Amino acid sequence: MAAFADIPAGVMKIGRHAKTFAKNRGLHRFGYCSCCGRRGLFYAFADVHPDEELLYLYCRHRKVARTLLAELELSRHPSIRHAREDLSGFRILDSSGTGPMSRAMAGVEGWIRGWYGEGAPPEGCRLADLQRFPFENASLDVVVSEDVLEHVPDLEAAIREIGRALRPGGMHLFTMPYRKDAATVRRSEIRDGARVACLPDVFHHDPDTRRGVLVYQDIGNDFEDLCRSCGLSFETAPTPPGREFHYFGGRPVYRSRRLNETHGRMPC
C-alpha cells in the first residue's frame, strides 16, 4: 500500500488511461475531425457518458458539426473549418462560443460566439442569455446549443426567444438529455429572484469551466408541444452518412425550424 501511495497522481492517471486505451483498442479509429479538419485518432474510453465514448485528440462535438454542414447543404466540406467561406453567408449563433466549432470559425463575419454562463463572457464571445436574446426579430439563420436547455431556468422563455430571433425557415440545432417516455420534470425554479429546489440538485460537468452546472429540468415528451406553441417544429435531425457515426453513438442531434412569420416578445 505504501508503494502505491508514493506514485504521483498524474502517473496513476496516465496508467488508467493506458489500460482503458488498450482494453478498447478494437474501437479506435483514425479520421478527420468535423470541426477543425485535422486528421487524428478517435479513441474510445469506458465508463463515460455515451456522448463521449469517442474522444478526439484535438476536438469533439463532431456530430453536431457534421449535422450542421448537412442541414445547410455544405456536406461537400469535410469540416467546419473547410466551410468557413460558405458559412460566412449565414448568421449563426453558437451558444458554446468557446467550443471547437467557434474556434474553427473565429473571425468569420456572421458567426456569433455566444456565452451563457456566470461572469463576463470570454474574449471574442457575446453574452447571449437564451431566456432573453440580445438579437432583433428574425435576425438569425441558425442557433446552435449543445446540452444547454436543461440548464436554463425558464425553458419556455428560451424556446420563445429562439423562435423570435430565427428567420422564417431558420433552424435551431441542438442536443439535450431527452426522455421520450415521461413528461418534463422541474428540478429547480426561480421564485422572487431566488432559486428554489423542487428535487435534489443534479449537476452536469462543464468542459469549459471544469465545474458542475445545475440542471433545472429533465426535459420530457411535452417538449414538442412547447416548441409548436412557440411556432417551431421539433424532430430528430437525420444522421449524416459516414462510418464514424456508427462508432460515435450518444444522443441524437435535434432540430427545430421557424414555422411562420409571427414574431415579438409575446407569451407562447
Image (cartoon, grey):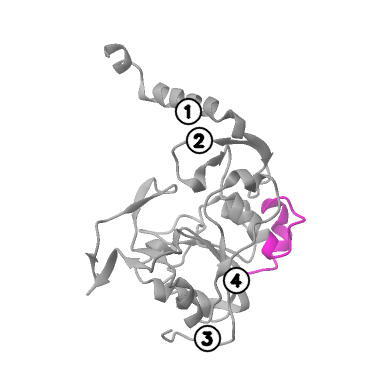
- Which mark is nearer the camera, 2 or 3? 2
Q: Label 4 to label 3, Cα distance in Å?
A: 15 Å
Image quadrant containing the N terminus: top left
Disc 3, disc 1: CB below 8 Å? no
Quick one: which residue is furthest to the right in this view? 76
Q: Is residue 234 above or below residue 197?
A: below
Image disc number at residue 17: 1
Three-letter amino acid code at the position of disc 4: Met
Three-letter amino acid code at the position of disc 1: His
Disc 1, disc 2: CB below 8 Å? yes
Residue shown at 56% from the left, 59% from the top: 253
Q: Does the image show residue 215?
A: yes
What is the crowding at mark 4: few (fewer than 14 residues within 10 Å), some, or many (at least 20)? many
What is the crowding at mark 1: few (fewer than 14 residues within 10 Å), some, or many (at least 20)? some
Image quadrant containing the C terminus: bottom left
Extent of the magenta region: 70-91
Left/right placement of residue 66 relative to residue 122 reads right
- Which mark is nearer the camera, 1 or 2? 2
Residue shown at 44% from the left, 38% from the top: 47
Left/right placement of residue 85 relative to residue 212 reads right
Q: Which residue is mark 3?
A: 263
Q: Is residue 217 above or below residue 78?
A: below
Q: Which residue is mark 2?
A: 45
Q: Which residue is mark 4?
A: 171
Residue shown at 66% from the left, 44% from the top: 244
| Residue 85 image position (x, y, % from top left) | 73, 60
Residue shown at 47% from the left, 60% from the top: 176
| Residue 39 image position (x, y, % from top left) | 68, 38
Q: Is residue 235 above or below residue 241?
A: below
| Residue 81 image position (x, y, % from top left) | 68, 51
